[in-house]
Image (cartoon, rainbow, N blue to C red):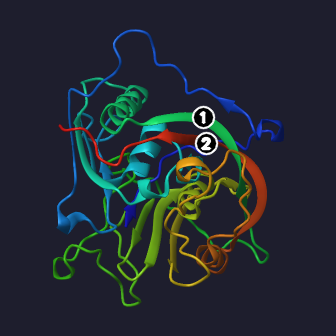
Amino acid sequence: MYRRHRLELLNVLPAAMMFGTVCVSAQPAGPKPLFEAASVKRPPPSGSSGFWSVRGGPGSNDPGLFRCNNCSISTLVTQAYDIQYYQLSGPDWIEGERFDVSAKVPEGATKDQFRLMLQNLLGDRFKLVVHRGVKEAQVYDLVVADGGSKLNESAAEMPRDVESNGRGDPPPRSAARGGAPETDKNGYPVVAPGCRSCITMAADGKVRMHSEKETMKDFAQMLSGQLGKPVRDATRLSGKYDIDLTFDTRVGPRNSFMPQPESGGADGNTPLGAPIDDDLGAPITAAVQSQLGLKLDSKKGQVEAIIVDHVERTPTEN
């Protein structure tokens, strides 16, 4: 699986807001922002594996065409509302329902306007209804482990190749393996040089996280996306670093690479403010400490969330 994460980590909210609820922000007056054209369809059987990609849109080298191939409904919602997976609460099945989405973006559209267009597309085609709230969650502080950091500081600045969000090229694919990522001698995926925030998983569950010239704040966001929990940078490291992290999702109590579905409440939603006590991510947290000299300290906190009230499995016709 190849993921790119450029979503801002929301600050932990005060405990007094734990059970609060607020309405989703109203859209500006006037015609609602819409794509010039949009197609939503099921992917072909050959594209129904776990590999997916998000490309194009404002801020990329193809701002006029947004493509989300083999994307789950949960991925589309996180893109539309600029949130991480751990901030989304909804039916378990929204991760398993996959679609190919292609949308023509009006010239000059901003990222905020694009997100409103995607929200409107989800509302029109999937009848999506959401509201904002806050919930208790396990959070991590990223700190330097005993013995010190093992990070390598980056060399001189290099031009960045922009694809979906300015974070580099996708990993090379092997024709002999049916388009799956190429792997090294240890079975971990190979990524293209210069790739930033590249996260790739081989078919057997081995994962490589690779980034160059990465700040600790952005690396914490990468970890957050994989752990399905908020990660805050508390390393006090101010430089930019070349990071290469490998881990095996088959090791440990649960698969920490995929976002974990939440359960309980009406329609499979987690009740607002419900405590989360499980400790995910044993393989990745151990790898962070042994390979990078960093440590993830676990604690409790509250995070802003998008709660799905209604969504339909089958979109309306194109």
**Image spot of residue 18 (x, y percent):** 77, 41
Q: Earlier in the sequence, mark 1 or mark 2?
A: 1
Query: Is 54 on the left-hand or right-hand side of 115?
Result: left
Q: Which residue is mark 2?
A: 305
Q: Residue at x 72, y 47 (%)?
A: 273
Helix, strand or loop under label 2: strand
Helix, strand or loop under label 1: strand
Dot 1: few (<14), some (14–19), or many (≥20) neighbours within 10 Å? some
Q: Amino acid at mark 2?
A: Ala
Quadrant (top left/top right/bottom left/bottom right) for the C terminus: top left
Q: Residue at x 56, y 84 (%)?
A: 251
Q: Residue at x 51, y 78 (%)?
A: 249
Label pair 1/2, CB-CB below 8 angstroms: yes
Q: Amino acid at mark 1?
A: Arg
Where residue 315 sits, quadrant-wise, is top left
Looking at the rendered structure, which numbered label has been put on residue 132? 1
**Rendered position, 116 above or below 84:** above
Dot 2: few (<14), some (14–19), or many (≥20) neighbours within 10 Å? many
Q: Residue at x 35, y 66 (%)?
A: 193
Q: Work out whether residue 163 can be spotted.
A: no
Looking at the rendered structure, which numbered label has been put on residue 261? none
**Image spot of residue 229 (x, y percent):** 63, 58
